[in-house]
Image (cartoon, grey):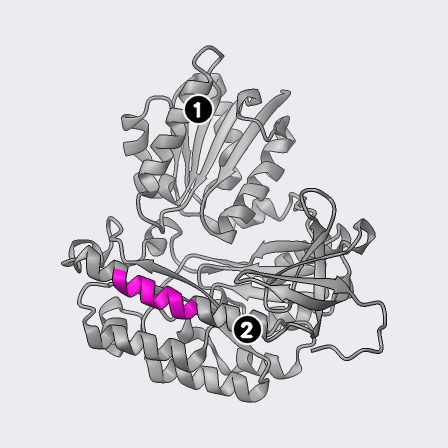
């Protein structure tokens, strides 16, 4: 079966990982990836349910596909991901153009599902929660991502049940993959060019399999000589355990950027969200890590205008940002997700939410600019990932995940080089390679 598949991915890094693994699977039954809609025999949309209007984006995309294939043979249309899990049968009823709906825990069934559809020409919905079988199957298929910085999912699902979040309903309960399964995948990625591993999970620092924790994984992965950097995302403040904190004392490859979503600076709002941590606990973790290594910086997520947020609560969030000085964060106005506890809460006036978001983003952006400006004239380590689109420069990332563009060459890809920073904007550093290795790194 020689067919072409077009895969479009929305949302988080885990969806990107999932899309890569889906392709690793369907490649076994004759599908070749294409970057062009019009060439596709199969169109797969991997969806995210975290942001507002996620469902509408799916139907909008299907509308585009319909127009493209109006005078061509219809492709096999598959909706995967969290919207597929949440909406399943409703999607098949509402949009006849959709053929298959596959949830995040059923990707191991995708090849059989495709064959069953072709054989019976009957629409199919696969949304059973079965993470164990999924990862057992995927562990037998090589991860062919082939990127310098590669994602590796170690944990899925969440047991926290924050009142605003759909993850427990779309990804299911927490499941941690076996340590050896993860290490085998990490070694394979390293053998195929990965120099940085980003460990992924909806609640990654809740990883726990047969007594092994995230701290054990980090220390084992950094023994792989080809791997030069290790990161993890996304964490929950409640699971920043002492063993994980201690890793920052001993690890040589764990990067000094801690992405730790706080969501709000108000204990009242955190309680209303059912976040299970307080601002005092959050700041205690911050202080301990900064004492261990003053180079450690934090990034976070913020929900602005959560129901019940008063001026004082908003001020608490603003004060937290001033205290921690997050160097890179995501902030959004609250939007209710169907099926969550917060779905039917009274919303705050949109104008107030927009004004608050603007104030929060201004101070967050100021922190980014301040951090980047502080690096001008300094020499930093950059992991080179690829060349820029026009091939005239090299692109890499700093220890803090900041994009760096400089005068590198193709043979620098996969290496850590020293770059003197000459200029910057909010999101990017610009510099030149330093050839004198005796110079001090910032």
Q: Was residue 347 drawn as part of the magenta stretch in this picture?
A: no
Q: Nearer the viewer, residue 262 or 413?
A: 413
Q: Is residue 67 left or right of residue 374?
A: left
Query: Is disc 2 placed on a helix, strand or loop?
Result: helix
Q: CA distance from mark 2 to mark 1?
A: 43 Å
The quarter of the picture where the N terminus appears is: top right
Q: Was residue 363 drawn as part of the magenta stretch in this picture?
A: yes
* Residue in view at x 56 percent, y 62 percent: 425
Which residue does the numbered mark 1 point to in the structure image? 65
Query: Is disc 1 placed on a helix, strand or loop?
Result: helix
* Residue in view at x 32 percent, y 39 percent: 55
**Residue 184 location, x and y as percent?**
68, 56
**Residue 424 location, x and y as percent?**
60, 64
Q: Nearer the viewer, residue 218 or 364?
A: 364
Q: Quadrant of residue 225?
A: bottom right
Instruction: Find the residue positioned furthest to the left.
Output: 346
Q: Nearer the viewer, mark 2 or mark 1?
A: 2
Range of residues picked out in magenta? 355-364
* Residue in view at x 57 percent, y 69 percent: 372
Q: Is residue 45 left or right of residue 154?
A: left
Which residue does the numbered mark 2 point to in the structure image? 371
**Residue 373 location, x and y as percent?**
58, 72
């Amino acid at each position: 079966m020689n067919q072409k598949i077009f895969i479009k991915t929305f949302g988080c890094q885990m969806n990107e990982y999932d899309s890569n693994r889906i392709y690793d699977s369907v490649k076994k039954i004759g599908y070749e990836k294409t970057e062009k809609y019009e060439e596709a025999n199969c169109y797969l949309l991997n969806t995210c349910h975290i942001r507002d209007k996620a469902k509408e984006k799916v139907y909008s995309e299907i509308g585009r596909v319909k127009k493209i294939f109006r005078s061509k043979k219809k492709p096999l249309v598959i909706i995967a991901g969290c919207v597929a899990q949440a909406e399943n049968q409703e999607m098949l009823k509402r949009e006849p153009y959709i053929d298959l709906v596959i949830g995040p825990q059923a990707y191991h069934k995708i090849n059989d599902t495709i064959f069953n559809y072709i054989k019976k020409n009957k629409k199919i919905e696969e949304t059973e929660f079965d993470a164990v079988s999924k990862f057992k199957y995927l562990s037998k298929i090589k991860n062919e991502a082939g990127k310098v910085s590669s994602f590796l999912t170690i944990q899925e699902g969440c047991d926290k049940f924050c009142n605003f979040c759909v993850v427990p309903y779309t990804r299911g309960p927490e499941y941690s993959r076996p340590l050896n399964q993860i290490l085998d995948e990490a070694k394979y990625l390293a053998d195929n060019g990965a120099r940085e591993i980003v460990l992924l999970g909806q609640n990654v620092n809740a990883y726990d399999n047969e007594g092994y924790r995230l701290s054990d994984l980090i220390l084992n992965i950094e023994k792989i000589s080809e791997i030069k950097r290790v990161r993890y995302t996304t964490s929950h403040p409640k699971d920043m355990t002492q063993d994980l904190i201690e890793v920052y004392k001993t690890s040589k490859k764990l990067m000094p950027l801690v992405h730790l979503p706080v969501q709000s600076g108000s204990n009242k709002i955190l309680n209303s969200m059912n976040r299970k941590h307080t601002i005092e606990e959050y700041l205690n973790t911050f202080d301990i890590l900064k004492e261990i290594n003053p180079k450690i910086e934090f990034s976070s997520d913020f929900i602005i205008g959560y129901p019940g947020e008063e001026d004082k609560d908003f001020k608490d969030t603003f004060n937290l940002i001033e205290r921690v000085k997050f160097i890179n964060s995501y902030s959004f106005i609250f939007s209710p997700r169907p099926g969550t506890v917060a779905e039917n809460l009274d919303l705050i006036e949109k104008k107030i939410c927009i004004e608050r978001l603007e104030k929060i983003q201004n101070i967050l952006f100021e922190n980014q600019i301040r951090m980047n400006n502080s690096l001008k004239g300094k020499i930093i380590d950059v992991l080179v990932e690829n060349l820029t689109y026009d091939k005239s420069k090299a692109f890499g990332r700093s220890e803090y995940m900041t994009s760096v563009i400089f005068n590198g060459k193709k043979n620098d890809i996969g290496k850590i080089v020293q770059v003197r920073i000459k200029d910057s904007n909010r999101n990017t550093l610009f510099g030149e390679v330093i050839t004198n290795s005796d110079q001090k790194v910032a």
